[in-house]
Amino acid sequence: MGKSTLLRQWQEAARRADAVTAVVDENDVHGVQQALVELARQLAEQAGPCKEFDKAVEQFRREQAAQGEPMPVEGEASVSSRVVTQAALGAASLLPGAGVITAMANPDAAAQGLDRLRSASQARARRRGARGDEAEVSRAFVAELERLCRRHQWVVLFFDTWEQTARYLDGWLLRLLAEEFGAVPANVMVVLAGRDELAEREWAPLRAQVADVPLEVFTEAETRALLTARGVTDPGVVEAVLQLSMGLPLLVELLALARPHTVEEVDAGGDLADVAVERFVQWITDPEQREAVRACALPLQLNEDVFAAAARPQAEGWWEWLCGQPFVNGRGGFKHYHAVVRASLVRQQRTHSPQSWASAHLRLADTHAAWRIAVEERLPEAKHWEDAAWRRHRLDETYHRLCAHPTTQLTPALEHVVQAAGQDTTVLRQWVETLEQAAQDTADTALLAWSTRLREALADDEPALACLAGLLAHGPLGPAARSWAHTHRGRRLYLSERDEEALIEFDRALAHDARNAHAWAHRGETHRWLGHHEQAVTDLTAALELDPTHAWALAQRGETHHQAGRYEQAVADLTAALELDPTHAWALISRGRAHEQAGHYEQAVADFTAALELNPTHAWALISRGRAHRQAGHHEQAVADFTAALELNPTHAWALASRGETHRQAGHHEQAVADLTAALELDPTHAWALGSRGQAHQQAGHHEQAVTDLTAALELDPTLTWALAQRGETHRQAGHHEQAVADFTAALELDPTLTWALGSRGQAHQQAGHHEQAITDLTAALELDPTLTWALADRGEAHRQAGRYEEAVADFTAALELDPTDAWALISRGQAHRQAGHYEQAREDLERAVEADPDDLSSTFEKLMLDTVEGHLEACAEQWSRLLASPVSPPDEAATRLLGLFRVLLLEPESGVAEATEEFLSANPDHEDITDALAYLAELAAMGDGVADRARQCRQLIAERASE
């Protein structure tokens, strides 16, 4: 038997052994994804839906459609002549008594080595932030294999005609078996059927797991036995069959089925395959069946519709009969002739009756054209090349027209190849292979030359670019086709991050055809990526003037406006794009981002949610919605979205970092640090995550760790203004005022309009006792943004500490007008009034503050100070006692020791002032704490009693220490 027959028998045996099986051959495969989809379809028919795999494929297709990402390019392989079956796998025996059988065929092995994923495709993924990678689909496929292996004894994957399919699958299969996509269960078996041995170098690591099962030609005894079983017993006829067939299984079977009676019926001379095929056809007794066999050799693949078109009405009812012939193979909806049989029948028809040959091909071409037009009725023109049925009919139509008239149809066919090169590599490969088939079937020298040229280009590291370059250099293309060729080259170069080269190609495209809207649009996209916003808008507008329904160009112009900060125009364009194509998820996400950056968080969330309704597994939409929730202060919803994105992809560093940042903003510092650390383990160069972790440490009071992280972020990117400012803030909180001022100053040199940094530098100056510099910075911050309540309050505090109480009260009042709930500004104004001697106004403010929050120690302290300086110490002694015994929250050593000092001064006259003062100073209070302590002591010293004397003594000790 032949290898394909043996493959079928092994598949039947595998199923009897409780195996789930699937088989693919050259009709199913023009790339990895097609093979996986077909394998999964067959596995699902036997074992139920492969839901996770289906989701991964759908996600991959959506990303391909949205991003325009070309497919990865696999290696090519050569074909040799030896017939062999080989297996690659790692399981024990499947067939009883068969020993270790791991596969049946050898790939065409590896002339070009392992699967080559281009660095360009990685650049494309980085450029768009997408994960358009077939590896994700492969990982999902391995997960399905694991699931099936838990429920079935075996899972067996059969790959027939490996001499052809290896060029697409050999490298991928090596990666699969090397477990790059996950652990392959031990009860998965892979069976390959092909004509060549496995390449030694590439397969050497797996050689111990491979069992070869060579298929030899029939022995004489086997040939005689088959002929006898078919009723061919005449000794002369048997000898003639032995001589003609040379034991090749297909030829023996064809000759045996014809049941010849005389030697002359067998031996007519000529090519043995042609003779065997012709004898078989001649021995079909019904002439109409005989003609149907010949007619159905012309199509590349057959289903019942193609059969009816090729064989004409008189062949009605013979489809099942044809499918039962030994030279007809295939599964599912399409069948095909054995390559040897088809080649012989095609050659005979072309040479015996050129006119009939041309007429038959034109009839089939017209049939496919009619089917193509029917598909076009339900599709907009922009979607034609995306539709598999449309592509199949266009491809078959082109093949048949080439076969009928290769000279006149060569140029249109090459122009179709130009468009195929603008799709993914799988589509381009199908077109080149079809041109090769037409070249072989017609023996036309020009076609043969082009098929060779394009096949060599396909083997290039960048097959689409190489094919298009060859077509431009040698092809008889018209101006429009040349424009498209340059456009597709420009697009490929852009996706490979070769932007300047891409712009040159788009310029050339427009020089050939200034009405090519796609060239304008893609040049605009390239300008957008380079930050040339005005040029981008100009080009995209030109594209839209040529084609106002170009939704993608509208969306790109909207994104350009968005990047330029023109949010209203962005939303307008993106809305118009969505009116043309409501399923454009990328446009929804882009509009959502424009809403988000304009501060319209509800509208942003609505857009991201709509995008997720179109594609629930769109991780970036989940992350974007999470970010909008976070900016709106909805931390729980934000965490939920980031978590959902991480369930889709647990290694998504940006989602981890975003969830960490959300925890930080919600005050969950430990969870923030955990997530940000996990993100940094995935990507140690993630400067934003380092900075965010630094902020989390800062907010948790871990200043040293905060400075370490922020410094590391700045080493990665010294221009991170916010990281500089945050490190300055960390230094300020740690009391390192000089370092704080230095960092804030560096941040302001990068961005002089950074209001927060100006205000914070003012705070650092204030805490260092440099009140004039503090007021200068805070005033500058308020000039940039007069609504900064905290800056007004801090400037008021600087004025208060400098003894300018009227200016202090004015600033605190302005802050309270902006935010009447600002308790600190209210308390500080009361303090300023008290220190200025305006006790009535002070009491009004401080009583209001205490009433608003009776548990607040600060407001209670300031009100008790007011009561005390007004001479009511005895009346409020009990309140002082309770207050001074209360713990400080959050813990603050300097504040705790200040309260201890006040307890000695006010409530413990027998205790030593010097010892209490020394205890206070041992906490190393900063300048601001000392300034406040001195101000309080000055108020107490003015009272004129025993407390006043003790306060003066304490104040003098502190002042002496401060001056050292």
Image: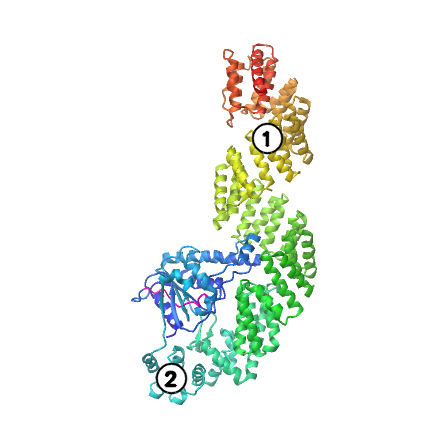
- Label 2 sits on residue: 243
Q: Percent from the top left, x then y, of residue 721?
A: 60, 40
Per the image, is 103 magenta? Answer: yes
Locate the N terminus by quadrant: bottom left
* Residue at the spot 52% in from the left edge and 44% down from the top edge: 657
Question: Between tags 1 and 2, which lies in front?
Answer: 1
Q: Which amino acid does label 1 sit on?
A: Glu
At horizontal 43% and vertical 74% (from top left) the residue drawn is 81
- Taking the spot 47% from the left edge, 85% from the top edge, the residue there is 287
Name the residue nearer the viewer: 486 or 24: 486
* Total marks placed: 2
Circle 2: is it few (<14), some (14-19), or many (20+) Cα within 10 Å?
few
Q: Which residue is drawn at 61% across and 72% down?
A: 412
Residue type at numbered disc 2: Gln
Percent of width and height locating residue 125:
54, 54
* Residue 380, image x, y percentages: 61, 64
Q: Where is residue 305 in the image (x, y as percent from the top left)?
A: 51, 74
**876 vs 816: above or below:** above
> Nearest the camera: 29 or 281?
29
Distance of label 1 from label 2 (alpha carbons): 100 Å
At numbered mark 2, what does the secondary structure look like: helix, strand or loop? helix
Which of the image's four quarters has the C terminus?
A: top right
Q: Can residue 56 be seen in this view?
A: yes
The image quarter in which residue 201 lies: bottom left
Say whether residue 199 is magenta: no
- Magenta extent: 100-110
Above or below residue 494? Residue 871 is above
Color style of the picture? rainbow
Q: Residues within 10 Å of mark 1 (few under 14, many from 20)?
A: some
Residue, disc 1: 738
**Is 555 situated above or below 330?**
above
